[in-house]
Amino acid sequence: MTAGTAAPPAPESGRPPGPAPQRRAPARVLLARPELGAVVGAVAVFTFFALVADSFLRPGSLSTVLYAASTIGIMAVPVALLMIGGEFDLSTGVMVTSSALVSSMASYQMTANVWVGVGVSLLVTLAFGLFNGWLLVRTRLPSFIITLGTFLMLTGLNLGATKLISGGVATRSISDMEGFPSASAVFASQLTLGDDVRVRVTVLWWLGLTALATWVLLRTRAGNWIFAVGGNGAAARAVGVPVARTKIGLYLGVALCAWVSGQHLLFTYGVVQSGEGVGNELIYIAAAVIGGCLLTGGYGSAVGSAVGALIFGMTEKGIVYAQWDHDWFKFFLGAMLLLATLLNAWIRRRAEATR
């Protein structure tokens, strides 16, 4: 080294030489979250009904809102994962009813402990999900067509089998059968937190499923696979992602949650109407879309779908507490779906522009 030339400074201990890693600004991190639009929408809906409905903020009213949201959210979460994986399921609404019907009729016809019917229902409902997933990967038909066919088959099966076995459009009551109290405690009980506050167990199911789905998406290899197959299935297959197994697993997850919802439906009332559930599949999809899921796949979050379900619950019960005509409910849901989709698209463009 020549005289008068300073030696280069030594790097700090533990840090390799070169430019220091740049940290993303908090605003960029926030804009990149898929559920941001849903959270903004949820705050707006909550504030609106808090101002126009005097009883909306009462503890009992809020617990009712959470219950309404949970019955949607239990299904919206797996539907969101399926949409992130690039697929749809139009049979979810009637699959919930099918699960309840199988459990009820199996228990009643076998005069067995109701837990036997619950177990049979689990196997049958998972078989429905396996059928959807297997047919999708074997035929490569659009999931819209496959699950529309399943929707129509289950709709007819629910009604036809119930009439054949029970002699009517509803099942026989199983509320006096052995095991009903314990099953009701698992799927349909209420937790009393105060004189006017009762939380249904479905809220715990909903929060637990949301936490589990979030962990799977963000902390496991399976979560990477879900995003990969939804973003570009051919590219994912080329790098070794088990595309078929991932999609079948997603349909099995939807079926599992349909079983949970079906058992709640049965053990809340003791009987099941065979025509229930038609149209609910669109509500589950709408909650996922409001929560930030893209119809093209590869983008979204479980938390966003849970917030979307909360928006539905607040709207449904907020209209009641405001003493408005409930016939306007679907109008408000459609308007929120459009607004949320536009807001999510704007946020996503802003996030991409700031990268």
Image (tube, rainbow, N blue to C red):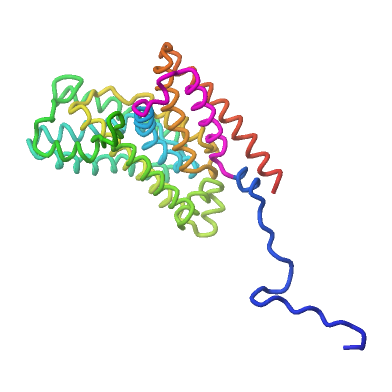
- State which quarter of the image contains the N terminus: bottom right
Query: Magenta span has 141?
Result: no
Q: Nearer the viewer, residue 233 or 217?
A: 217
Q: Position of residue 15 (x, y in %)?
A: 66, 73
- Decide which of 114, 121 is in the foreground and name it: 114
In x, y percent, where is residue 187? 24, 38
Q: Position of residue 181 (x, y in %)?
A: 14, 37
**In the image, is 261 to the left or to the right of 282?**
left
Which residue is nearer to you in this view: 184 or 121? 184
From this view, report whether residue 35 is shown above or below residue 23. Answer: above
In the rendered structure, the answer to whether residue 224 lies left or right of residue 6 reads: left
Q: Which residues are magenta?
A: 33-61
Mark yes or no: residue 150 visible: no
Horizontal side, residue 19 vs residue 103: left or right: right
Relative depth, front residue between 132 and 214: 214
Would you say residue 48 sits in the magenta stretch? Answer: yes
Q: Is residue 347 visible?
A: yes
Q: Residue at x 25, y 27 (%)?
A: 158
Residue found at the far front of this picture: 195
Kindly report the secondary structure that dominates the magenta region of the rendered protein.
helix
Where on the picture, by quarter, is residue 98?
A: top left
Q: Is residue 175 above or below residue 55?
A: below
Position of residue 153 relative to residue 293, above or below, is above
Query: Relative to 22, is 156 above or below?
Result: above
Residue under the image location 42 percent in, 26 percent down = 57
Name the residue at the top extreme.
325
| Residue at (50% x, 20% y) in the render | 51
- Residue at the (13%, 25%) spot, across then down: 172
